[in-house]
Image: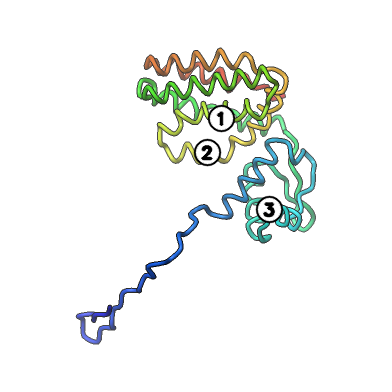
């Protein structure tokens, strides 16, 4: 249907017809999906430190073009998970103590902020979910299931962050969290039992509305990660 601009010399104004049978658009951005697949493969050890990453081989593996792979590698380079040598190669970075310490301190600060702000504000369902994730974490540690432990640990800490709803905090954790996760994978592969008790204390303090106490325990949790 068309009308006319009322101004002198105005152009016809038409509404674009929308097909009634238009297929739904997949809202997942391909480049984000490729980035997450590659990021997770580095964090879980599928791609080991020092391993060369070739965009053509990665594109074939993921069933995509080389463009989103190259974009993902640039993002991974910005977070320190890969090292790119222009015109030569891209390799998975080794775990550098200083880079890990820097990332850990930033990630810890974001989680401390989240638990301080949401203390006393979690719903009963949120608290139940955190306790359930800690039970799942403990079971995974007992079973030597590192992947399961990391998944449960991530889900537990994500609840206060999501409740806070601070997009800046989420963006920082999205960038630097994977650097810390690589080191956590090594720790959970040897012993993560101490984290179970710390998680319980954290949940109790958040539930009681003790912002400073929850913040202190959050600091202890993240700073217990060895960086040497």
Q: CA distance from mark 1 to mark 3?
A: 25 Å
Left or right: 16 in relation to 155: left
Mark 1 and mark 3 in contact? Answer it, CB < 8 Å: no
Q: CA distance from mark 1 to mark 2?
A: 15 Å
Tell me the quarter of the image containing the N terminus.
Answer: bottom left
Q: Residue at x 44, y 14 (%)?
A: 204
Q: Residue at x 65, y 40 (%)?
A: 40
Nearest to the eye among marks 1 and 2: give it. 1
Report x, y in % for residue 166: 42, 37
Report x, y in % for residue 88: 79, 55
Nearest to the eye among marks 3 and 2: give it. 3
Q: Residue at x 67, y 51 (%)?
A: 73
Report x, y in % for residue 14: 30, 78
**Which image quadrant is residue 99 in?**
top right
In the rendered image, which residue does mark 1 sit on? 154
In the rendered image, which residue does mark 3 sit on? 62
């Amino acid at each position: 249907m068309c009308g006319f601009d009322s101004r002198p010399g105005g152009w016809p104004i038409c509404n674009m017809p929308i097909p009634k049978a238009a297929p739904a658009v997949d809202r997942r951005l391909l480049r984000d999906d490729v980035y997450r697949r590659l990021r997770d493969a580095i964090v879980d050890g599928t791609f080991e430190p020092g391993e060369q990453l070739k965009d053509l081989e990665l594109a074939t593996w993921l069933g995509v073009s080389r463009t989103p792979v190259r974009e993902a590698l640039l993002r991974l380079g910005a977070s320190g998970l890969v090292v790119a040598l222009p015109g030569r190669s891209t390799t998975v970075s080794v775990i550098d103590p200083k880079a890990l310490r820097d990332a850990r301190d930033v990630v810890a600060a974001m989680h401390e902020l989240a638990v301080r702000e949401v203390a006393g504000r979690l719903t009963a369902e949120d608290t139940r979910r955190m306790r359930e994730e800690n039970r799942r974490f403990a079971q995974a540690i007992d079973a030597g299931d590192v992947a399961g432990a990391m998944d449960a640990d991530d889900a537990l800490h994500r609840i206060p962050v999501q409740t806070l709803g601070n997009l800046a905090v989420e963006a920082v954790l999205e960038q630097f969290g994977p650097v810390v996760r690589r080191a956590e994978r090594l720790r959970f592969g040897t012993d993560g039992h101490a984290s179970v008790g710390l998680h319980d204390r954290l949940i109790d303090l958040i539930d009681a509305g003790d912002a400073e106490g929850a913040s202190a325990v959050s600091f202890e949790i993240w700073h217990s990660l060895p960086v040497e």
